[in-house]
Amino acid sequence: MKAIVIDDEQLALESMARMLKRMGVEVAASYQNPLEALMADQWPDMDAAFVDISMPGMNGIELAARLQSKYPTLHIVFVTAFDQYAVKAFEIAAADYLIKPVRAARLESTLERIRRNPRHQDPVRAEALPTLVCMHDLGIDAGGKVAEIPWRTSKAKELFAYLLHERDKAVTKEHLQDMLWQEADTEKAMANLHTTVYQIRQTLKSANLPVQILYAGGRYRVELGGVKVDCEQWEQALDQAVAGMDEGQVYRLLLDGYRGDYMQVEAYLWAENERERLRIKWLQRASEQALRLEQVGLAADAIRLYQEIQTRFPTWEASYLGLMRTYDQIGNALEVKSQYAKLLQMLEEDLGMQPDKETTAWYAAWSASRSSGPG
Amino acid sequence: MAKIMVVDDAAFLRAMLKEILIQGGHEIIAEASNGEEAVDKYRTYRPELVTMDITMPIMEGTQALQEIRRLDPQARVIMCSALGQRQMILDAIHAGAKDFIVKPFQSSRVLEAVSRTLSN
């Protein structure tokens, strides 16, 4: 293992380098000045960086964030005399977090963690990694086949789902205890949490997922180990396709790529805002795309998308009007009327409302043109 | 044109609602992300109208509505709900809510509900 050490205090720097060497780590360089470290050119070969958090000029977290964006697989270990930075440090996915004075046994476990999770991944293996599925329900997608993960208990599933939801953030054990074992007393809740984390680790191992549950400073977080999450991939692909105006891809992502709402089956309350955010993102893109298809005269495709919008969002009135206009394009008067009737019924039954002005005006004009015009 | 407070625990939903209201010529004078904060800010800012999400952590929308009505019996509060929260909407209307809008927000419906509430 090759590592770099950065600390503005000469003594701390030397002591850390010495300890690492004793444990078989090759210390390629050590820096007192974070800027100098940033300029160094050995970074691509490094496995790990041990970074002091409080340094003059540029603090360690900022340095680490910049290093991490340049070298995403570099393991960053924070070293500090204070633990007030722990949360911030975990936001940038640190491999570990050490409090000074650093003890040998503690450092050993850090190195062990880094060794278990080597950064140089075989590209073939990386390709073959399964994807974690969150859309519709929680599962794994291995080569296009989605399977459930055999969780031991529903609490194990929810705890994992929550850590996945909060990925890259470390969650305090108190928060997890309150969330999952509210009724139990503290001691019982703590025991339950430990057992459940153990069960999750076993399940992940037997499912052959390189995903890990890490614990440091009273906080848990999930380390995905290169495994991707389907909704994140979907969102990125959709943004890219929209930016690149790849209409075919946008259409596919909206209709086939969106397996379902975020953790829809599990219906966790804490997932509600994310569920709604993704749903609305889908709705906005689908509405834009359906309108475009309608305007360029691709009626069949527009109809399919409007219908999908209506199924997912029955109160979204624009889908009814869109369908009315598109059916009118292809001369299907029966369907125009039927959509209007459907809208009236939905508004009346679900909301006790009338259609909005735009819709009523369109329908009135359409009806008038039929009775006066030809055909 | 009214001074409005927007209450929702999801920041992106507050942002969407704000955009609709500002485009409709209204002014957002406060925002809150739970019921408790909403009651506090109502006391401070005295908005002419409040949009209130029903399901929120710490204090639910319906309870916040009741507390705000206790502070100010004239308070105008519009509830925001998802489809399928019929009973909650009815409870809120009994507790003095002036109107309701359903998610996802449709610009014309939001502005309609606001102007209806203001003119009553």
Image (cartoon, coloured by chain):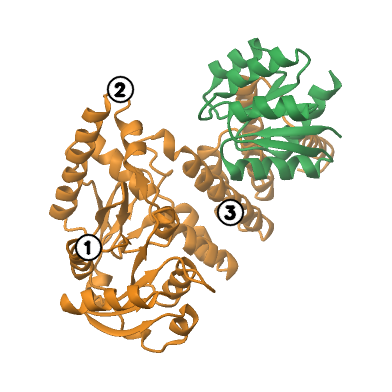
Image point 61% across, 41% down: which residue? Answer: B13
Question: Do discs 2 and 3 belong to a common subunit?
Answer: yes
- Pointer 3: what residue? A285
- Pointer 1: what residue? A103
Image point 62% across, 32% down: which residue? Answer: A338
Q: Name the secondary structure under disc 2.
A: loop
Image point 65% across, 28% down: which residue? Answer: B38
Label 1 to label 3: alpha-carbon separation: 53 Å
> In the rendered view, does A274 fall on the left or right side of A184?
right
Q: Name the secondary structure under disc 3.
A: helix
Identify whether A163 is placed above or below A337.
below
**First of labels 2, 3 by sequence position:** 2
> In the rendered view, does A44 fall on the left or right side of A319?
left
- Pointer 2: what residue? A183
**Label 3 Cα neighbours within 10 Å, binned few <14 / some 14-19 / many ≥20:** some
> x and y percent of residue B36 in the render?
59, 26
Along the line of sight, which residue is nearer the eye, A55 or A120?
A: A55
The colour one sees for chain B in the rendered image is green
- Can you tell which quarter of the image residue A195 is in? top left
> x and y percent of residue A116 in the render?
18, 67
Quadrant location of the C terminus of chain A in the rendered image: top right
Type of residue at label 3?
Answer: Arg
Q: Name the secondary structure under disc 1.
A: loop
Along the line of sight, which residue is nearer the eye, A61 or A156?
A: A61
In the picture, one chain is orange; tell me its letter: A
Type of residue at label 1?
Answer: Arg
> In the rendered view, does A371 fall on the left or right side of A153?
right
Identify whether A36 is placed above or below A186.
below
Query: Disc number at residue A37?
Result: none
Identify whether A119 is placed above or below A82.
below
